[in-house]
Image (spheres, rainbow, N blue to C red):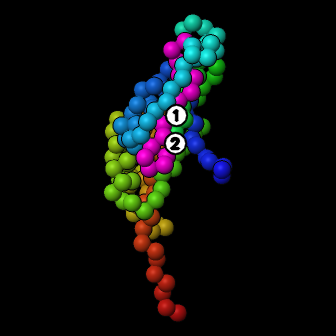
Amino acid sequence: MPSILNPYLNFRAQAREALDFYQSVFGGEVQRSTFAEFQLAQDPADNDLIMHSQLTTPGGFTLMAADVPAHMELNPGSNISISLSGDDETELTGYWKKLVEGGTVLEPLNKAPWGDSFGMAIDRFGIQWLINIAGSPREESAV
């Protein structure tokens, strides 16, 4: 089995809501485990927090997420970006439109200097997304 790169997102008591949102964007199935299920809560208030969750989508994406208990440090959104790239303009534009709802567009989804369409946004949970839609290959000019 080859190595796989999966983004892992950390939240402060929002992992359940965030993975439900990403499921509404990308489809697929979510699996969840709480701290209570594994008897790992150091504080009873952490029992229902998500210790680990995973969204597996029909398109082959995998997102993992967890809630960080209050006794641990968390700097939301500042330590991760997620890049979605490919050549299916309809699919990627659809993801873009859903991800920016309630979020902040940093760079509108437009034609980039390298010939692709590119956009950058922070979703409503503070996660930065980079969308790159491959353009037509540049034609070589005759010399």
Pick whichever, 137 or 29, lies toward us. 29
Q: Could you tell me residue 112's position as x and y percent?
A: 44, 63
Looking at the rendered structure, the secondary structure element under dot 1 is strand
Specify start and end residues of the magenta stretch as a single range.
Answer: 47-62
Residue 114 is at least partly visible in this image: yes
Residue 58 is a magenta residue: yes
For this orientation, the residue located farthest to the front is 1
Between marks 2 and 1, how big is the CA–CA gap?
7 Å
Secondary structure type for disc 2: strand
Q: Nearer the viewer, residue 73 or 55?
A: 55
Marks 2 and 1, the one that precedes in the sequence: 1
The verdict on residue 71 being magenta is no
Quadrant assignment, res 118: bottom left
Q: Residue at x 64, y 15 (%)?
A: 40
The residue that label 2 is drawn on is 62
Residue occupying image coordinates x 61% and y 17% = 38
Q: Are marks 2 and 1 in contact (CB under 8 Å)?
A: yes
Q: Can the viewer see residue 130 in this picture?
A: no
